[in-house]
Structure formats: C-alpha cells, structure tokens
Amino acid sequence: MYRTHTCGELRASHAGESVTLSGWVNRRRDHGGVAFFDLRDRSGVVQITINPDLPKETLDLVEDVRFEWVLQIEGLVQKRPAGNENPNMETGEIEVIAKNITVLNPAKTLPFMVSSDADLPDENTRLKYRYLDLRRERLTNNMVLRHKVIKFMRDYLDKQGFIEIETPIMFKATPEGARDYLVPSRIYPGQFYALPQSPQQLKQLLMVAGMDKYFQIARCFRDEDLRGDRQPEFTQLDLEMSYVHRDDVLDLVEGLFTEMIPAVAPHKKLLSKPWRKISYREAMEKYGTDKPDLRFGMELQDVSDIFAKSEFKVFQGALSSGGVIKCIVAPKSADMSRKEIDALTEVAKSLGAKGMPTLAVTSEGVKGSASKFVSAEEVESLKAKVNAKEGDLILFASDAKAIANKVLGGLRVWFRDKLNLADENLMAFAWIVDFPFFAYNEETKTWESEHHPFTMPKLEDLDKFESNPGEVMSDAYDMVCNGYEMASGSIRIHRRDVQMKMFQMLGLSDEEIKTKFGHMLEAFEYGAPPHGGMAPGIDRLVMLLADEPNIREVIAFPKNQTGRDVMADAPSEVEPKQLKELQIKFEQK
RNA sequence: GGUCUCGUGGUGUAGCGGCCUAACAUGCGGCCCUGUCAAGGCCGAGAUCGCGGGUUCGAAUCCCGUCGGGACCGCCA
C-alpha cells in the first residue's frame, strides 16, 4: 500500500496515528541533526521530521534527497512541540515523525522551481514542461476549481431534469462563422469531416428528437487567431431546452450561476440578484461594447447638443457628417502627463479614432488639447451634464456613432486597469438582450446573421425582414461578466419556412442550402418543437473565479498564442504513408 | 495580415556605447549546523547577452533584418 492518507488531510486529530504517505519533496530543511521535508501531493503539504536517531543508511539517504523526489514515508503523526506550530500551513499543527523512508523515484534538477510562484518562468518554458508547471499549488487549485465548477453544473442540471448527451467531434463543415478545423477522410478521399465550432445543429436535432432538456460539457473548435481569452479548442456548457421562451432559459442559467458562485468560489460577490438585463443598444451607448464591465461607472455620455454650435472644427466636422460627440470622465486624471496622454491617444487611434481631444478640469479652469476651442458656456454646461469635478479628465470622441462608442469603450477599460476601478472580487453578471438580427458587412455588402443563422427573429419584426433588415431584432441573448462575453444563446427557428427565408437572406443559393443544411430543414418538417438554449464558456468562467489573467492558466494543456502545443510540439509533420492513405499531396513544402 | 512589446548563467532580474574579465537573487555542487518552515552560514561551478548583418577605434547596450514569446487590432456565425 503506497499510502494510508493524503498529505493535506492530516490534522491534530490524527495525532498518535501511524500513517504512510507518498508524495513529492516540496522543500527540505536540513539542520545537520534534525531535518525536515515538506511532502506534497495534490491535497496539500505536510512536514516530515527526520530525527537523528534513525539508522545510518536512512540518514545517508536523507542527505541525497532533493527537490521533487518521490518518497514514501512511514511515520507517526505528532502534535508539534509548543511554539513550533506553523499557522500558515493547513497541516501546521502536526508533523509526521519519519520511521522509514523509501525513494519511489528520484528526480533530476527541475528546469524551474514549482514550490513557489516567485520568479515565475517565461510562459514558453512553463508550457514546455506543463506536467511540472501543473504541480504548482496555483495550477493544481485551478484544476480542482474547474472540476468543482463542472461537477456543480452537472449536478444542478441533473436536478432540473436535464440529461447529458455526447455529440460527435467529427461532423460537417459549415459555410458561415469561424474557420473549421478539417479532418480528411481516408474512406472518402477528398472529403472532410469538420470539428464542431459548437454542437449547435446537433443539439437542435436532439430537441427534434424529443430529448427535451439536454446539456453537455462540450469541446468546441474554431480555427481563428488566438487571444488571452481564446484558445483553438475550448469548453462550453452547452444546453438546449424545448418549449421555452427567452426568460425560461435566462432564469435557469441565472439560477445555476447564482447558486454555483458561492459554492465554488465563496470569496466572489455577485453584483446583483436578479441580474440586470441591458439591451444591446443601451450597452453600446453607455459602455461602447456589447460585453460591458459593470463593476465601475465611467459611462459614455453623448454631449453632441452642448457642442451643436461649436467653433471646434473637429467637433463641427463630426456633427455635420452625421456623427456624434461623446465623452467619458476619468476621475483624478487631470494631471496625466503629456507622455501618458500621447500613449493613450495611440490606443484611441488603434480603435479607429482620428484623435483624442481632452479637457482637464483644474483649479485654474480647463486645460488640455480641446481647451482652446471651447467656450466658457460650453465648459459650464458640459461640467454640469457629465458631472465633472476638479481633478477630472474629460476625453472626447467625435466621429460616427459606432466609432465613437468603440473608442470610448476601449478608453474606459484602459482607465479601469490604470486606476484600479474594478473590484476584482465582484462578479458583475448581466444579460445583454435585444440584439439586432442582421449585421451589415461593409466589405462584402451583404447582410450577415449577427448571432448564427438558426436564431429566431422577434415575431413582431418578421415583416421588416426584406424592407428593413437592420431593424429586425432577434431573440438572442448574451451573458456578460466583468467585460467578458461569458455565454451566448437564443431562441431558435423551429419552422422550415422561416429557416429557409433566413438562409435566403444570407445569400445562400437553393443548392447550397440543400447540401449544407438540408438535414436541418428536413428535420423541421417532422414536428420540431419550439426550443432555445445557450452555451456558457467554462474556461473564461474559471479564469475569473481563479483570478487568472488568461484562460491558459485554467486549461491543463493549452496552446500558445500561435496555436502550438510546445510540450508535444504539435502541429507536426506526419509520415508520408499517412498522407498517401489520405491521398493528400502538397503543392509545395 | 497589422501595431506595440520582450528575448542576458538552469530560473527570474540588473546592466542600455568604454568602468562588463557581465552584477544580484534563486537553483545547482561541496562543507558546517538538532526545531526549521522562502531555514541559516561558508566555499565553488555555471552566460561567447536569441540568431545574422551593419554603424563605431570599441556593441549585451545603437541601427537593419530574422526567429521565438506576449498584449492588442483585424478575425472569432
């Protein structure tokens, strides 16, 4: 038997028990006479005490032991001598007096220390030795937290009458949306499976199949460029329900999250119960994004009316070409240096701004790049309207509304980080609702579905489908939290005629519709129930709950920003024989 | 595809034209040490400063290119 207990579970109540432990040497402290090892397993760390009265060969062995050796310890649990307790350790009241030590496996010197997060190595090195990096308490805890989150979801949904159903990883390529990862077929040369961007079609077909309430911890694949919160494969809690309206879905998921957060991450507070519902339009107007961070204010304000007769050419120009003048007020930032303002202007430009006029409210009146061009009356009405106080910095965007919103939304987040405006223990969940159904693509001059092509339009907008597609609202919704999109969902189309119209609006030919989506349309002819669902992203959720800066920290084996697994070195070339079987040849190498 | 940024012993940093024969911490090796918990003390080994080219009397340091990492924009139905 390798062990009778885990390292982290021992407490004062175990005093007097003989135990066997197995684990890694986290630290060693050799005093020449007495020596200590901290033995670690997933459950935690416990101090092993080696007294000098052990046999010589055991003491010689102790001399050789180094960090991360795997040991088996047989010993006696004892309360530590008075004054020697360590309140910083879960097991700090006791120690295990070693009677026998077995080396299960020695270890080479590791490329980095795993017993401390100080001097964290370069991420590439961490990823190359991911199996070592995961030994860190922090990453181990992340894996445990992730397990708890998924376990809670399964238990909760089970109680609510959901069943978990697996859907294929090898499925069919879809024309719209993200790029597909393709899997060549050996049996059908020249044909490909696609890895699902989400189980969207399959879960709808499960509704047609009468499964009623389905969920799955589903892996999704999208071949797009990566970010800190985006991996090529990621995990969603995918769920779908029959005979529901929007609020049935929202209430269910809100209930799940509201109960889950205190259970798995008690230090996190919820912003509000029930969650706010914010229309897409309001989110864009007030926060400049459809995934607002609601942990702080600094809302965008439209001040076009104040500058209707402005002398400032920049403002004039924006208004005369149909744009707006909007601003945000950054608290206690009137003294920002020229250098900082310049750097921030670059941020604004990267978001599409042509410039970034500012007004600093100081005891000696307003200063800043716009101060020369604004009248005293304008300043007074501005200060009153946006509630700017001495020491505040007002930043403007004057442009087409969409650009102004985007720029100020970006600056708002920049100030959040600079001024520490957001409480990191707050989970500011909200629903974004009433999305437009179509988005106009300026490049291709076509209408595209804003969500996905299976989303139900609002019934009252059906007659605007052709006359005014931009005004059609959809029964889609997003869950946002702290500036991240956490989930996306919708009530789906369950009627063949509406789905057909949708595909036609998106410019698909009858032939394309038949070959790409024929199975969906046919399914809808056999009595498809009204249904809807959503899919919360698990990686981002765990990232926020674990206070991690990116989702790689909560994924056991993530890929780097260029989509590479640096541990196994994938993707990699394959044997010519494999390519030949698939009848694949490359034009050049 | 674009913008910004980083690359110095095993690891993390400092150095940013000559004081560099590259510093500090940690890890590593050796010795000492009976109550530590980032144990402590002493000694020692370990880096052609990512790579290539250029400027210069002289380059870790400046310039160009390239490779690799990260952040962001595009992209992500």
Image (tube, grey):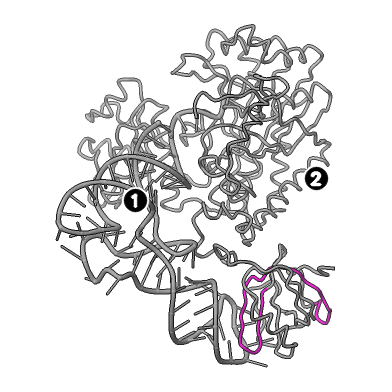
Asked if B6 appears above or below A408 in the picture, the reply is below
Residue at x 69%, y 44% (from the top left corner): A257
Res. A180 image quadrant: top right
Label 2 CA crowd tier, 10 Å (few <14, some 14–19, many 20+):
few
Looking at the image, is A266 positioned above or below residue A214?
below
- Specify the quadrant of the image occupied by residue A532: top right
Q: Are marks 2 and 1 on the same chain?
A: yes
Residue A21 part of the magenta segment: yes
Stretch in magenta: A13-38
In this rendering, the count of numbered labels is 2
**Drawn side of residue A475 relative to residue B1, left or right:** right
Residue A586 position, x and y percent, is 54, 25
Question: Residue A113, image x and y in percent?
Answer: 56, 65
According to the picture, the residue beneath numbered tag 2 turns out to be: A155
- Residue lying at 68% horizontally and 26% vertically, measured from the top left: A581
User: Toward the viewer: B1 or A374?
Assistant: B1
Instruction: Give the image quarter of residue A38.
Output: bottom right
Amino acid type, label 2: Asp
Disc 1 sits on a residue from what chain?
A: A
Amino acid, disc 1: Ser
Main SS, magenta residues = strand
* Residue A248 image offset from top left, x and y in percent: 73, 31
Image quarter of the N terminus of chain A: bottom right
Q: Which residue is mark 1?
A: A333
Residue drawn at 79 percent across, 24 percent down: A207
Residue A88 % position (x, y): 63, 73
User: Element under label 2?
Assistant: helix
| The residue positioned farthest toward the front in the image shown | A577
As displayed, is residue B8 above or below residue A276?
Answer: below
Discs 2/1, front: 2
Marking on residue A74: none
